[in-house]
Amino acid sequence: MSAKSPVNITRRHLLGTALGGAAFLAAGRSFAAGKTLNVLSHKVHQTVLGTGDGDLLKDWRSANDADITWSTFDSNPLQDRLFREASLNATEFNVGFMVDNRPTSQIAAMFEPLDDYLKKEPIEAFDDIAPGLVQGMTVDGKLIGIPVRHATQGLFYNEALLEEQGITAPPKTLEELVEQAQKLTFTSKNGTRVTGMVLASDLAVFPVMFARAFGGDFLTKKFELVPDPAAMEKGLTVLRNMFESGALPRSYATTKNDDQVTWLQQGRAAFTVLPFARFAQLNNPEQSKFPGKIKAIEFPVSAALQGKTPMASVVEAWGMVIPANSRDKDLSWKFIREVSSKRVTLGMANNGNGPVRVSTYKDKSFADKNPVAAVEAAALANARGAFPPFPEAARAQSIFLEEVQLAVLGRKPVNEAVASISSRIKPLLPPA
Amino acid sequence: MHTNPTMRTRKVAKRPALRADRLAIGLGKAVAVGAILVWSLFPIAFIAMSAFKPGQDIFAVPPKFVFTPTLQHYGKLWSDWGMFFDGLVNSTVITIGATILAITTSTSAGYVYSRYSSRFLNASVLFLIVVRLIPPIVVTLPLFPIINAMGLNDTHIVLIVLYATFFVSLGTVLMRTFIDQIPRELDEAAQIDGATRLVTLRRIIVPLAAPGILAVAVFVVVFAWNEFLFAFIFTATKAKTAPLVISEMIGSIDGVDWGVLFAASTIQLIPVLLFVVLMNRYLVAGLTAGATKG
């Protein structure tokens, strides 16, 4: 008879069990579907497609006997990863999400041209997708991405603060906006120090919007740099004067995009410029002190342009792309077709996605659910990107922002800053 | 006994001055320690408190220190960011794996450096130090296509090996210092009793060098638990760690939910904070190892 205990746990058993357990945990879940589509995206792209009963791709999965594995990253890391994967000999990722300010000729070459796929198996009512967004995903005459989401900038205001200062309607012109912002730089009745407007200083979007309000621009699609210097000077002068009068916060140089949201939610600022998609967050009763009181309008143009030139708000769009080095491209295209369909576009819009189809804005269920749908649709009609993609875009943007900050903070005369923008960025532009 | 009255007066006059000086020094020290504590603990306290604050109050001006605590952010973290908990599991697996690998390698190497001597070994010490001087980003990007070609992308094993690799040099130097303090006579006695080198290492050296092993473990655990760059480059879904998920919460294009972000940060902080507090004395031992040698 053995003298050993029936339960004999040795250190080896313990170590083996621990390592085995770790390996089991590391192995992850297995899926029953026959095929797997690997998608590289931001989490928001996955979220708007719904889950459980609200899963907008439920039927597609069963029809194609495929499951979808999402790998999600923050915006910039996502683009970095997508381009790195596309530069390999082969990648496991079948579909990626790309921002429209990234595809230069070199980048576009790493992705599958989609024109032939579109001819062979067309996307439902492709003409319904905003042509400007499709144009943003067309490089060297080739369609490399199908637009799926847009974020168009609008002017947000806190109605309660306007009422407190006796302002009955939001501004109709840029001059009115400046006047109201100055009036709204005050201490509110609850003791909060209010600043007329809050803007992040590290994004090109805002100075571009102010320049466009005077008919100017930073860089056009045809790579015309500061096509109207006088308009750019006017836009920057407005920002400079607002900063000097305190209508922009003293912390302007360090203000970030997220500060704009929290300042508006807390009633510390009366106006800001953000994508219309932020409407729900700004009015979220769990976060905002002014739920239902934060409204949005299209950013106003200068009085001189009113009724003559529409405001070209800044829009950023996302498109779905297929890496040229990926496998099973037919399955990828089927996925893109489904996500681009009218039904899924509407479903995603109801889940907070900026819809790329014109028809979605006309849908009653969407309009009822989204109070800024009509305003957003109007703004989208004339919207365009902040600047076109080109290899030195990041450097050009940082030079532009540096000069804008110097002008707004009063460290450099506005006209000199505008002249510097032109002279310093010109050598970075692609040859004509 | 006769005492000189002048001297007595001088002593009496000196005592209060001495006491006042000591009091001032003590007060100065207390203020300095207090300031350092506030400086280091305020961000942690702010994050932990905000995780229990109603969303409206997180960025209230003036800040609210008295509030009704809520668990809503933790609930939302659970429902909306399930992948954070998958990330925690991955972080745990990778941290444990990297720690075991780093300890095993460092202890073995430390033993060799402590007990053997040769020209090659002396030269390789320099190499260990040079490896520590290379910024991780320099090796990270070129490694990406290689790891991908080996089919190791998005696996736990790649992070376990990388994290352990980056700590083997420091761990080896630390372990060598600890093992140097163990008398060689113990090795010799074990060998006379018939123990092989491996048995000597396992039965004699490892138990006696346990404080050193724990010190190395503290360094590796803290590094592996919080590391971002390697995890960002080499993982996507299956081996994604918690810091990566937290970075996604910060960069959300539909707005940052600060309460949820702070809840995740608090959860992420607890295990490593507990571990460091429990192992504090070994961490100090690791930092001061060999300081009084010679």
Image (cartoon, coloured by chain):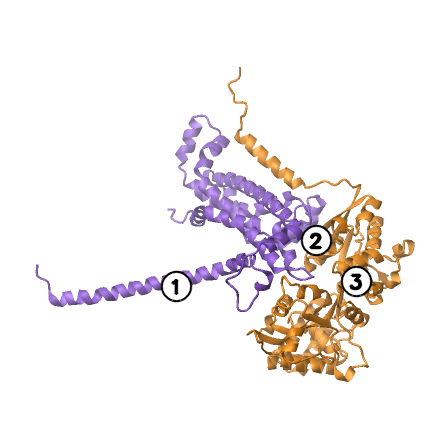
Q: Position of residue A146 (x, y in %)?
A: 82, 59
Query: CB under 8 Å between callouts 3 and 2?
Result: no
**Which numbered disc flags the more N-terminal residue, 3 or 2?**
2
Amino acid at circle 1: Val
Amino acid at circle 2: Thr
Query: CB under 8 Å between callouts 2 and 1?
Result: no
Q: Is residue B236 left or right of residue B6?
A: right
- The residue pinned by badge 2 equals A72
- The residue pinned by badge 3 equals A366
Chain shown orange: that is: A
Chain shown purple: that is: B
Extreme-top residue of the structure: A1
* The image quarter in which residue A304 lies: bottom right
Q: Secondary structure at mark 3?
A: helix
Q: Position of residue B103 (x, y in %)?
A: 52, 41
Amino acid at circle 3: Phe
